[in-house]
Amino acid sequence: MTRKAHILLVDDDPAENLILRSLIRKVTSIEIELHYCQTMESALAHLRSGEPVSMILMDNRLQPQADFRETVPALRRHGYIGPVGVISASLADPYFQKLEEYGADFRIDKAEIDPTAIDFILREYLPPA
């Protein structure tokens, strides 16, 4: 039986949803169901809905919040304890070095996201079947 992961993508750019969907179709080691929210409010509503969430991929800059230093702690305050990855077009800002202080588990440059990276992240951060 194939393992299943529920990934919640939180990104205000709908194109990122389409890009990630096309990439996850190429991951064969695990069945992935992608859920998508454009705002922090809709992401929190998704978490409250009781839908399963194995991992959250959070865009670094999500308006009106400044960056992950505001959004990830909000996820944690609302009780989400699973892995949170911050995705960004640039990881150059020094605050990325203090990722764990804000409750995030990992970071990845959007340009580095491919089926191999997705497979690695899932194997690294999800519990074994």
Image (cartoon, rainbow, N blue to C red):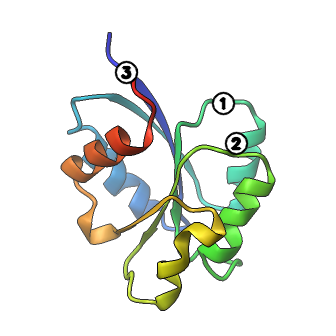
Q: Residue at x 33, y 38 (%)?
A: 123
- Give SS at disc 2: helix
Mark 2 and mark 3 in contact (Cβ < 8 Å)?
no
Dot 1: few (<14), some (14–19), or many (≥20) neighbours within 10 Å? few
Q: Decide: marks 2, 1 in contact (CB < 8 A)?
A: yes
Please state which of residues 45 and 18 is positioned toward the viewer in this rendering.
45
Where, by quadrant of the figure, is residue 40 drawn? Answer: bottom right
Query: In the rendered image of this protein, does residue 65 appear above or below residue 115?
Result: below
Three-letter code for the amino acid on which mark 2 is drawn: His
- In the picture, the disc for residue 14 is none
Q: CA distance from mark 2 to mark 1?
A: 7 Å
What residue lies at 43% left-to-right and 54% top-to-bottom?
A: 17
Does dot 1 land on a helix, a strand or a loop?
Answer: loop
Residue at 43 percent of width and 44 percent of height = 125
Q: Amino acid at mark 1?
A: Glu
Q: Residue at x 40, y 62 (%)?
A: 15
* Residue where numbered disc 1 is placed: 51
* Cβ atoms at labels 3 and 1 below 8 Å apart: no
Residue 37 at x, y percent in the picture: 60, 53
Residue tagged 3:
3
Label 2, on which residue? 46
Judged from the image, the secondary structure of the residue bearing numbered disc 3 is loop
Earlier residue among tags 3 and 1: 3
Task: Kindly tell me whether residue 20 is visible in this rendering.
Answer: yes
